[in-house]
Amino acid sequence: MVIITGILVFVTMVAIGAAVKYGKQYWLIAGYNTLPKEKQKEVDIEGLAGFMGNCAFILGAFFLAGSVASSLWYAKLFPAVILVYTGGVFYMAIRAQRFVRREKTKGEKRASTFSMAATLLILCGVGAVIIYGQASPQVEVKAEGIVIGGLYGTTIPAEKIREVSLENEIPRIIYRNNGLGYGEIKKGYFTLEGLGRGRLYLESREGPYIFIQTAESYAIINFKDRARTEALYESMAEVYPAVPGP
């Protein structure tokens, strides 16, 4: 799926880049196409088109290469690819302003600076969430309950736990309600076929999976390392042996 996304982005970016740079389809340049005619005359459109086209080629190739690398070798690389790609688009938008021939007013300069700062802040925030989201959840098994740390962490009280089991497969994920879902990582609230809404803390598409059934819902955990998943299950099973549901 990641590779398919990479191919689609690459083809789209190359097509747009070629249309702008060689086909002179300037209406594809966001911002320029909405300028009044008199303002468009202040733009070095040929220079801008060449710059935008080259950037589109580079960004498309980068996204494809990153998608292939993350799909074949290191799945956790993909969020970083998205972040760098977004930063590249941001850089392209900023550098494109040098093709405007006229001097900007103070108000326009302040607005541009504010826009750059806000975008950079958003990118940093997204990057922090992605990095934090990739960290394995710290799970503590206590007599009073199971404590799951990290993003979308929670505490499952002992009195609500009905059964803890180790399964090789889980039902199909229908959709994400509220959480992170990229590559093999799934964290947060998801709806599974036949089970409804529950919490997932997954790092791999391969089993085994620790299934914690509660009075109202469920939580499913697994790690990239199979042995780590099995060891956590053993520690849970010692404290919470299977209890028939009500």
Image (cartoon, helix red, strand yellow):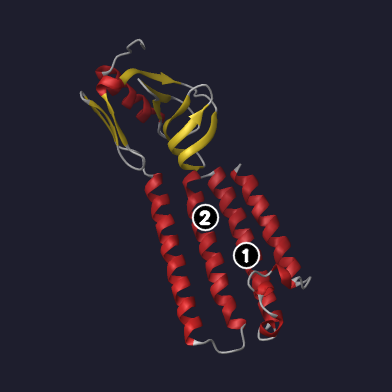
Among the 4 quarters of the image, the one containing residue 22? bottom right
Q: Residue at x 65, y 45 (%)?
A: 4
Among the 4 quarters of the image, the one containing residue 203? top left
Q: Residue at x 37, y 28 (%)?
A: 229
Which element type, helix, strand or loop, lies under badge 1?
helix
- Please indicate whether residue 137 sits to the left or right of residue 192 in the image: left
Q: Quadrant of the C terminus?
A: top left
- Please indicate whether residue 39 sits to the left or right of residue 121 in the image: right
Identified by mark 2, the residue type is Val
Q: Residue at x 62, y 54 (%)?
A: 64
Residue under numbered circle 1: 58
Judge whether 195 appears above or below 90 on screen: above
Farthest residue to the left: give it: 143
Q: Is residue 203 visible?
A: no
Identified by mark 1, the residue type is Ile
Which element type, helix, strand or loop, lies under badge 2?
helix
| Image location of residue 190, percent across then percent down | 47, 34
Judge whether 222 appears above or below 132 on screen: above
Q: Please give the label number shown on residue 172.
A: none
Judge whether 224 appears above or below 14 on screen: above
- Please rate how many residues cluster around mark 1, counting C-alpha atoms within 10 Å: few if below 14, some from 14 to 19, many from 20: some
Q: Is residue 112 visible?
A: yes
Q: Nearer the viewer, residue 228 or 32?
A: 32
What is the CA distance from the residue labelled 2 to the residue labelled 1?
13 Å
- Please indicate whether residue 178 sits to the left or right of residue 6 in the image: left
Q: Please give the label number shown on residue 81.
A: 2
| Image location of residue 191, percent across then percent down | 49, 31
| Image location of residue 193, percent across then percent down | 54, 25
